[in-house]
Amino acid sequence: MFFAPISENIIEGASNSRHNRAELRSRLGSAWSCVRLLVLACVGVGLLALENASLAQQGAASFEDLAGRAAAARDGGNLPLAIDLYGQAEQVKPDWAEGWFYLGMLQYSANAYPAAIDAFNHLLALQPGVPPGMALRGLCEFETGAYDDALRDLEQAVAKGAANEPRNEQILRFHLAELLTRNSRFQDALAQYQFFAAKNILDEDVLVGLGLAGMRVPLLTKDVPAGDREMYKAAGAAGYALLAENTQEADGLFAQLFTRYPTTPNLHFFYGFLLFPHTPELAIEQFKSEVAISPGNLEAHAMLAFTLMIASRYAEAEPEAELVLAKAPDMEMVQLALGRSLAEIGDVKRGTELLNQVLQADPDNLEAHLGMASIYSRTGRREDAYREHMVCRSLAK
Amino acid sequence: MLTVNTWFAAAWLSRAAWLGRWRLAVGCRAGAVLCLVCLLVSGAAGWGQAAKDTVAKSAGAAVTCATCHAGVVAHYAHAPMRHAMEMGGANPVLDKHPNLTAQVGGYSYSVQTKDGKSTYSVTNGTDTLTLPIQWMFGTHSQTWVLEQDGHLYESYVTYFARGEQLGITPGDQRITPHNLTEAMGRKLPIWETQECFKCHASGAVDGAKLTLDTLRPGLDCERCHVGAQQHMVDAEHDNFKTLPKSLKKMDAENVSNLCGSCHRTWDTVMRNHWQGPAFVRFQPYRLEHSRCFIGNDPRISCLACHDPHQGVDHNDAVYDAKCLACHGAGKVTVVALPAGSVTPKICPVSKDKCVSCHMPKVELPGGQAVFTDHFIRVVKAGEAYPD
């Protein structure tokens, strides 16, 4: 398994039959390089200065001795001793941020996740929001099942640039994608999986995870029933092919899926969703197939309405959007689809109201501004149309 | 013709005069409407009979658009859109340039035409890949779609009419080929293939499927005049009620969107965040940038200046009347300006060849082709290309 936690691989001789020793060593090296990188990146000169200043105040010799021995134990691969010495050093000097980082990292490596979280809590109290600390705490929280905390930390860490090294990036993005899927943020999860296709990183867990996100199933890969794993993997493989721009292969794989699982919800939705940014017309076909299979699938109806609007098929979009809006009046995508469609087919008043409703909640919504520009243009309100055009140009930049 | 301003002035000379004028106008209008209705009815009946006669005379021969619309079909036969694609064996561009070569990076390209058949070759000096050219996109400059192992590729090099030579296909400058296949062309995703054939050919796309076996090169009447085929079928049975929608009655916004379905709309460019001079070739988008564009004014519609059934007229002076329809002194005659609108400005520099200053020519990146920027504006000296 490609995305086993780093800690499983970091202690030589760990009882994990799935990995050979060479791979373990490679991951160990990778994890240590990660440690060094993280230290350099986040702790830095400021912390060292802090450390030196503090040393002068609190039994410098004792602390220096402990810190030196801890580093030696760490470099020598004696993790239990290193953990013990870093712990002692932190007793002497609790504001030593670098020590908390190493202690957390070593605890993580020893699969001692609650202890690692505690160490990273201390680090983050001293250095709030430091990306490597957030990232590693997030991975630990994932292991302890604190998924909401893990999602919060990993999302912030990735946003702040923690995924700055190829190995880190794979691990962080995969865990983040899993958590986003579990949290029903499927579109965000797909954006994370896009990274793997773009980098041509192929792994069974990635495929299963991508299948789950695409089919909008809020599960972690480890929680997938064994009997369903093959289907999600196949869906993920089809999605992966499309994300990797092997579109003909993807089309064939999706066709096979539709034959094999003709009534399974969200397979057509998945394909349509991936096609949508490139070709609304082809996406529409998929969303139509989806609502035929699952007439109660509001999201599919919403996507169909929105895509029909984007394709300028306003008369078809309008009834779809009305259908969804009756059940989900606050769904922005449908307000946009219906507002623009109504305006284009003649009901300018209600169309304008709906688009303005979107703009009140989201003043920089490009799609709403495009709709308003069209309304003003068609109704001859030259200055208003020009103003909306300028807003669109600004937003499009 | 009475202008808008003089009409207002006259109307408010006096209430009595205005009422009298109103009564007279109503009377005249009623009479005019009656006459018009009579004319239309008789005309329509006359035209309908003529059309029926024409179709009847053609009994035995296949009815086509030209059966009734011979003039426009004859013109359209030479229009660029009719030749948006050529098939192998019918390509005047390559017939005229039977031996094109280019060196791009480490690869040599050769496009050879002999006995009406064209081939596209690329070599790295050791290996050579040669493919027949089946589909040729464009009337002046030309890009080819090639097939290898069941996949379609856009040729990495294009013939540019400007220099009568091969160069890298626009948009592909960012690609660095790593092998002979990549040097041959860019593998087309299914959606791009569909869009290429949809905008350059007819009958090539059926719903979500690419149907190259039924492809007809170039755009036929149905592409813009949706319902033309049905209209022909119905006309054969004396039914002239199912006419295609009249494009002449569409407002500027709708015309822009129709043309923009291939030439790209404002919305499409905004949604895709496309920036830079490479996109100057998307005229409906550029036109909507213009301060003078307004969707309900037919004077700024694509069709105000261009007849798609004809070739593009490159004589700048031809377009002066179109510009002066709004920007000519005292000529605001077609539509009433909304309250608060600014009266169109009159050019202080010239009254002719307006487009030569206000619609500048822009080179595509690479300099292989030049497009007229349809963003109508006062161009300031030395200004950067405005997105």
Image (cartoon, coloured by chain):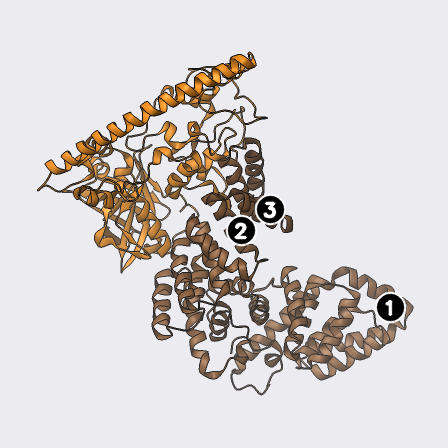
Chain colours: A brown, B orange
Q: Are the residues under badges 2 and 1 in a single subunit?
A: yes
Secondary structure beneath dot 3 equals helix
Name the N-terminal-most of marks 2 and 1.
1
Q: Which residue is mark 1?
A: A55
Q: Is residue B260 visible?
A: yes
In the rendered structure, which amino acid carries the disc numbered 3?
A: Asn
Say which chain tag 2 marks: A
- Which dot marks residue B165? none
Circle 2: residue type: Leu
Q: Which mark is residue A336?
A: 2
Residue drawn where x is 24% and y is 28% of the image:
B42
Asked if the residue at tag 1 contacts the one at tag 3, i.e. Cβ–Cβ closer than 8 Å, the answer is no
Q: Residue A26 at x, y = what percent? A: 56, 75
Q: Which mark is residue A356?
A: 3
Marks 3 and 1, how far apart in space? 61 Å
Residue A322 is situated, as x and y percent measured from the top left of the image, at 50, 56
* Of the image marks 3 and 1, the number of the one nearer the N terminus: 1
Quadrant housing residue A6: bottom right
Q: Check if mark 2's residue and mark 1's residue have beta carbons within 8 Å.
A: no
Quadrant housing the C terminus of chain A: top right
Up the image or down, B197 lies above or below A105; here it is above
Query: Of discs 3 and 1, which sits in the foreground?
Result: 3
Q: Nearer the viewer, residue A345 or B196?
A: A345
**Same chain check for tags 2 and 3:** yes
Front in this rendered view, residue B176 or B207? B207
Question: In the rendering, at what x and y percent does residue A262 appear?
Answer: 37, 72
Closest to the camera, between mark 2 and mark 1, is: 2
Residue A57: name its quadrant.
bottom right
Q: Residues within 10 Å of mark 2 (few under 14, many from 20)?
A: many
Amino acid type at mark 1:
Leu
Count numbered badges in the picture. 3
Marks 2/1: CA distance?
61 Å
